Structure formats: structure tokens, C-alpha cells
Amino acid sequence: MKVKLLIATVDTRFSTHISNNISEHHANTIDVSVCNTLECLQEALSKRKYDVALLDSSLIEHADTKSIHLPLFLWSENDAAFEVPTGYERIQKYRRISVTVATVLERFAKVSKDRHESDSDTAKITAIWSPAGGTGKTTIALAYSMFKANYKKEVFYLNLEPFSSIPTYFNESGKSISAVFELLDSHEGNVKMLIQGVSCCENGIYFLNRPDNYDDMCILSSDNTVELITSCAQLADELVIDLSNSCDERTRKVFELSDNLLIVTDPAASAEIKLKQFISQNNVFESIKDKIILIANKGTLVNQSPVESVISFPYIQSNDAIGVYKALSEIGFSC
């Protein structure tokens, strides 16, 4: 589903700049139209309905909102004394276009009725998990993401740890994943579209920023987790899910949804003991055994593997967390 966006402003320089940028960078998400005169606006609204319209002060009073699902007032400091018509939310005119696009998608997602919109093609889902902490699970998750991105795949990295590692690896310049959680809880709106609006991209990897509050992730239900994953899977070729070390109901749901499961271990005795406990004492192991790839991280020696597929990575001693996962991505993930 593309959002039908109308930009109505007499500022032709602004409209040309923003529409060209949207057409170049957001064509898969937004179908943009431009009107710079009253006559053009009236004709456009008589012939077509728009999901969102950005209208400046010179044209807003002449817009027939019956043809616009979400009308927004394109505001600048020059409009400080302008009285905004009833029913219009304000959106700032002069700021980064990526922020404007994110805001448009976020606001429309909340009023859209197509909550369960789905695509025929969905991403391959790979979950990364470990029963022990400190094994390098997140580093492996990002190395795998970069490995796929280097092969020109669209990769979405979803961090579901209660304490997020996002700030260590990415520049948090966008909105929090908490905005998505709120929409999931409301049972209204279009989750996929909101994720498109608030996701960021760095090093070729799309991601959602950490929650505003620790409890936001902890209270995420299993059903909401499934909807979150399903929505993210419609936005990329590869969905990489970085899980916490627990093996609760929510984690098991992710195991079920995943095509591949990378289980990470390291040379620590505690990691070996916990992995053996998971294999021998947890009834979920047999049901997911065929999709598991064991990641022997940090130079771990594996004498007897519980699964057929094993990938070994060396120990890279460095304080540069980003450099480490990039180096591991170059080694690759061939079994």
C-alpha cells in the first residue's frame, strides 16, 4: 500500500525539492502529487482522494477536506499569527525531509484502518539467541545483518532485548520503538506503516530505536510480538531478530516464526553448561533442532555438536564494537 500524498503550497522551490526527494528515496512507500495554485488544488481534489495532504497557509482554507483522509497544516515561523482551521494538525515545513516523511507515515498509520494489510512476499527470518549472557550474541546478530546487506539484501534488524544494545552500534536519531508498542496495544492503525515511518537505516541495516522505558519491552505480549515480527517481515528481504537470553513464551514464539536460529556460545564454562541444560532439559530443543546453526564464537572449540551446522568465529580483541561486527561479517556465515 502506497500512501497518496498531496503537497499544496505556492512555494514552488520547496515543493519541487521535497517531491523530488520523496520520488527518489520513498517511491515504494509514497505516491506524491504537487499543487502550487488554487486551481490546481481544486482540480486535484475533485478527481482523486488523498490519504494525506500537506497544505500551507495560502491554500489551506480552500481545500475540500472531504477528499483528504488526514489533512496537515504545513507550518513555518512566518505563520505564527495564522489561525489554523479546525481539524488540522500542524507539521513543520522546514526540516529534514526524512523527518517529514517519518512524521507523515507515523500520523497516517495511527488513523489508517488497514491494520492487517499484508504482502505476499515476506522476509526470511533469522533469530539469534543464547542461553548465556556475554557470548557475543548481539555482535553476531549485527555481523549476520551486515553479511546479508553486503549481498544487496534489504535487512531489518529487530532488537528485542530488555536492555537494548542499539546505542552501542547505531546513532539514535529517530523515534523510539515505543511508538510501535503503543499502536500494537491500541489494536487500531497500520503497524507496518508506522514501522516504516519510525525506522532508521545505518550501514545498510534498518532498525528501530530502543524503548523509551525498560518496561515497554518487558510487557510486550506474545501476540504483540508476533504482530511486530510479521509487520517487520513485510519490509525487508531479511529480518534478523536479536533476542534476550530467556526462553519464555515470547521467545518460543520467535523460535516458531524463524526460518533459521543461530545459537551463540563462547569458551566460558558457564556458556557450555547452560547450552547443555537447554539441550537436555528444555523440551523446545527437539522441535527447533533442524533450524539451528551453532555459532562457536570467540575461538570456541566444539568437540561434539548437538546440531549438524556449526560456524566458528575467532576472538577479535577490540574496543570498537562496530569494527568487530563488520570484521566478523567479512568472514561470513558458511557452514
Image: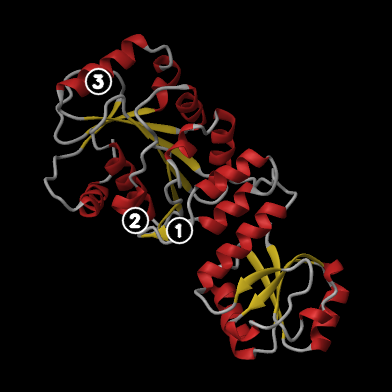
Residue located 41% across and 27% down the image:
291
**Picture quadrant of residue 14:** bottom right
Q: Is residue 235 left or right of residue 328?
A: right
Residue 29 point in image, percent of width and height: 62, 62
- Looking at this view, is 157 or 169 the one in front? 169
Numbered disc 2: secondary structure: loop
Residue located 63% across and 83% down the image:
15
| Residue 323 appears in the figure | yes
Residue 58 point in image, percent of width and height: 74, 86
Q: Relative to residue 203, is residue 214 depicted above or below? A: above
The answer to whether the residues at label 2 and label 1 have Cβ atoms under 8 Å apart is yes
Indicate which disc residue 200 carries: 1
* Tag 3: amino acid: Ser
Of the residues under marks 1 and 3, which one precedes in the sequence?
1
Numbered disc 1: secondary structure: strand
Residue 216 point in image, percent of width and height: 49, 39
- Looking at this view, is 37 or 72 the one in front? 72
Q: Is residue 81 left or right of residue 277?
A: right
| Circle 1 Cα neighbour tier, 10 Å, few/some/many (<14 / 14–19 / ≥20) | many
Q: Is residue 122 left or right of residue 1?
A: left
* Tag 1: amino acid: Cys
According to the image, label 2 marks what residue? Answer: 170
According to the image, label 3 marks what residue? Answer: 305
Q: Residue furthest top?
A: 281
**Picture quadrant of residue 88:** bottom right
Give the image's coloring scheme. Answer: secondary structure
